[in-house]
Amino acid sequence: MNKNLQVIFDRTELGIKVKTGWKFYPYEDIIEIHADAHYSDIRISKIKMPVCVDVPIRIFAENLPLIFFKYNRSGIINLGYMQSYKSRGKVIEIMVNDICYIVSRYLKANFHYRIATLARKSFPCEKCKTCTKRGTCGDMTPFTIPID
């Protein structure tokens, strides 16, 4: 095992290394990940202060589930928290918890593709966290996207 391992990507949760061991946060509790150089701040819904890890954002972008969208070079949001989005010419504005995020021009097509893909997919249900058949679960809940 790698000594410098800071995060673990599980099927339903993200593991973050802390001084005394590991803490696991369900993906649905993660609102946003914001990067600053080689560090990333993870904003979690049940915690006031963001959790800081020594992991670049590209690692998160490559390993997080489909529900997460990298909206610009230094930010990833959980589309499950999206309240609405608006396309205004070359600009897409996404509202998440009353905060407006602007999608980069080069990610605009990727955003529309992601929304169309999510509308056809299903995601793990609450039972999946304790299910013994996690890999083959047939009880999936549909994901709905609020459209303006």
Image: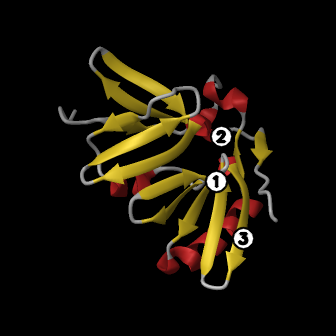
- Name the residue rendered at 51%, 29% in the picture: 25
Amino acid at dot 2 = Thr
Q: Earlier in the sequence, mark 1 or mark 2?
A: 1
Whole-percent x, y for residue 64 in the image:
48, 50
Residue that extends furthest to the left in the rendered view of this protein:
3
Q: Tell me the residue that label 1 is attached to.
A: 79
Q: CA distance from mark 3 to mark 2?
A: 36 Å
The residues tagged by marks 3 and 1 sit, at their Cα atoms, a distance apart of 14 Å
According to the picture, the residue beneath numbered tag 3 turns out to be: 86
* Residue drawn where x is 45% and y is 57% of the image: 75
Whether residue 88 is visible, yes or no, is yes
Which residue is located at x 25 percent, y 54 percent? Answer: 37
Q: Nearer the viewer, mark 3 or mark 2?
A: 3
Q: Secondary structure at mark 3?
A: strand
Q: Position of residue 112 (x, y in %)?
A: 65, 74
Question: Quarter of the image holding residue 115?
Answer: bottom right
- The amino acid type, in three-letter code, at marker 3 is Lys
Viewer-closest of 114 and 46 = 46
Q: Is residue 131 left or right of residue 101?
A: right
Q: Are marks 3 and 2 in contact (CB under 8 Å)?
A: no
Element assignment for label 1: helix
Q: Position of residue 99 (x, y in %)?
A: 61, 52
The amino acid sitting under disc 1 is: Leu
